[in-house]
């Protein structure tokens, strides 16, 4: 079984570029948002839920799905990436959710 990814895998890479296999643009890890667990949740959950937010160019949206991502001067991850509603016209936001 593969290692479970945690917040700590992504925090050092905030604001770094991420190359996506098969896509000619890059993403940037813009934010890692972890939810504080209630005491009862700590006893039953195997990891803290979190979301990794990415920022990309405003056009040519990366399709939702599994993608191989390579962090600049860092690790590679295979993640399910989802484009999300982005009110700002200068970018497209994406997220990967970890429950």
Image (cartoon, rainbow, N blue to C red):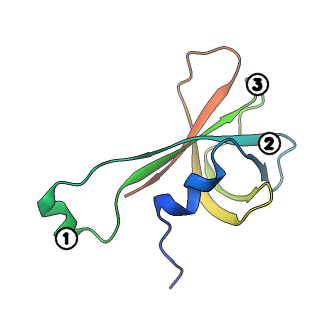
Out of 31 and 1, give the one closest to the viewer.
31
Compute the Cα span from label 3 to label 1: 41 Å
11 to the left or right of 20: left
Q: Earlier in the sequence, mark 3 or mark 2?
A: 2
90 to the left or right of 36: right
Residue carrying label 3: 59
Task: Give residue 54's position: percent from left, percent from top.
Answer: 62, 40
Neighbours of disc 1 within 10 Å: few (<14), some (14-19), many (20+): few
Residue carrying label 2: 26
| Residue for point 56% across, 63% down | 9
Out of 81 and 29, give the one closest to the viewer.
29
Task: Give residue 6's position: percent from left, percent from top.
Answer: 47, 64
Residue carrying label 1: 44
Q: Earlier in the sequence, mark 3 or mark 1?
A: 1
Q: Nearer the viewer, mark 3 or mark 1?
A: 1
Q: Indicate the secondary structure of the residue bearing disc 2.
A: strand
Q: Earlier in the sequence, mark 1 or mark 2?
A: 2
Q: Measured along the vertical axis of the image, is residue 88 above or below residue 52?
A: above
52 to the left or right of 34: right
Locate the C terminus by quadrant: bottom left
Task: Give residue 23's position: percent from left, percent from top.
Answer: 83, 47
| Residue for point 41% across, 51% down | 50
Q: Measured along the vertical axis of the image, is residue 22 above or below residue 94?
A: below
| Residue for point 26% across, 68% down | 45
| Labels 3 and 2 touching (C-beta < 8 A) | no
């Amino acid at each position: 079984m593969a290692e479970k990814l945690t917040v700590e895998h992504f925090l050092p890479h905030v604001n770094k570029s991420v190359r996506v296999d098969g896509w000619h643009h890059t993403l940037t890890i813009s934010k890692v948002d972890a939810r504080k667990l209630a005491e009862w949740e700590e006893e039953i959950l195997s990891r803290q839920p979190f979301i990794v937010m990415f920022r990309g160019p405003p056009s040519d949206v990366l399709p939702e799905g599994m993608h191989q991502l390579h962090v600049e001067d860092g690790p590679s991850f295979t993640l399910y990436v989802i484009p999300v509603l982005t009110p700002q016209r200068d970018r497209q936001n994406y997220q990967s959710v970890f429950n």
